[in-house]
Image (spheres, grey):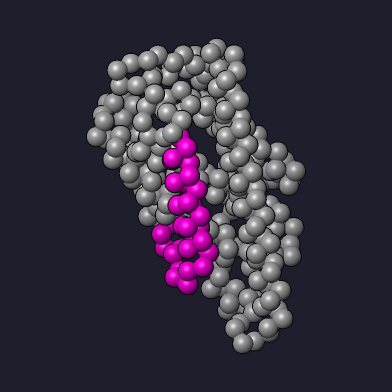
Amino acid sequence: MADWNDTSRNAQRLGAVPRAGGDVAGRVTFDAGLRRHMLSIYNYMASGVLLTGIVALLFVNSPIFALAFTATPTAAGTVVQPTVLGWLITLSPLAVMLFWWFGAARASLGALQAAFWAFAVLFGLSLSTIFVTYTGTSIATAFFATAAAFAGLSLWGYTTKKDISGWGSFLIMGLVGLIVASLLNLFFQSGPLALVTSIIGVLIFAGLTAYDTQRLKNEYVLVRGTELAGRAVIFGALNLYLDFINLFLYLLRFLGNRE
């Protein structure tokens, strides 16, 4: 992912951002461009989330779902087991992520847009299992809680004068630890560990939402007026999309009632 550190401070030193009380017209133009840039990111991100939800809902009600996943009711709730097709669907978003990690820097803007929509579709297919694992009320509650939390955290990240760029390294270390703990729990199947990882996951992605919003805002001073602006919108939308989806999933695991 594109990431430029300390962009706002460097831009102020170089005069890239009009100073308060200085060039008023330049400041107004800059602010208007920044709002358009961030709205483009939010529009892509929200459209991606909507597409993922629609695909998940359509797929779980299609006959193909039964070929990909088997749902078995138990005393603890419905257990979903993937078939070979199910594993392909579950792991398919990783193929797109490999493109983002290794090929995005050389890809055209059109290829990046196609990869973003492809990821939203594939993630929707793999996310469809939540509709047979959790109750509809739990899913709706977790979604609206996520939307409210995301809006508040992103707004704070956008408006705060506090520099939270230092959060990045701690959040990434926490994310790595969270992934390791989640993988371990696949073997141990520990209820308390699952609860702890859910709580930590909510906190980490809440922090990432605010952090990524401020980072994307600061990056605008580097990409405005250049051919990188369109690419930065797609990269930014993917970052916020992942923050939203993961925050939703961890909230659902923490608050949700199983079928």
Could you say which quadrant of the image residue 111 lies in? top right
Residue at position x 69%, y 69% from top?
32
Could you say which quadrant of the image residue 114 lies in? top right
Residue at position x 57%, y 34% from top?
53
Q: Is residue 67 above or below residue 124?
A: above
Can you name the residue that lies furthest to the front here? Answer: 137
Q: Nearer the viewer, residue 194 or 113?
A: 194
- Main SS of the magenta part reads helix
Q: Nearer the viewer, residue 228 or 44?
A: 44
Taking the image as drawn, is residue 123 in sight? yes
Q: Quadrant of the C terminus?
A: top left
Can you name the residue that lies furthest to the bottom here? Answer: 21
Q: Position of residue 98 (x, y in %)?
A: 58, 36
Residue at position x 37%, y 34% from top?
256
Is residue 191 shown in magenta?
no
**How many marks can you see?**
0
Q: Is residue 110 above or below residue 257?
A: below
Q: Is residue 104 above or below residue 223?
A: above
Q: Position of residue 101 (x, y in %)?
A: 58, 42
Residue at position x 56%, y 56% from top?
3
Determine whether, in the image, residue 225 is placed left or right of residue 22.
Answer: right
Is residue 158 shown in magenta?
yes
Q: Position of residue 212 (x, y in %)?
A: 51, 56
Determine whether, in the image, residue 27 is placed left or right of residue 74.
Answer: right
Q: Position of residue 195 (x, y in %)?
A: 29, 37
Taking the image as drawn, is residue 177 in sight? no
Q: Which residues are magenta?
A: 139-168
Q: Nearer the viewer, residue 44 or 22?
A: 44
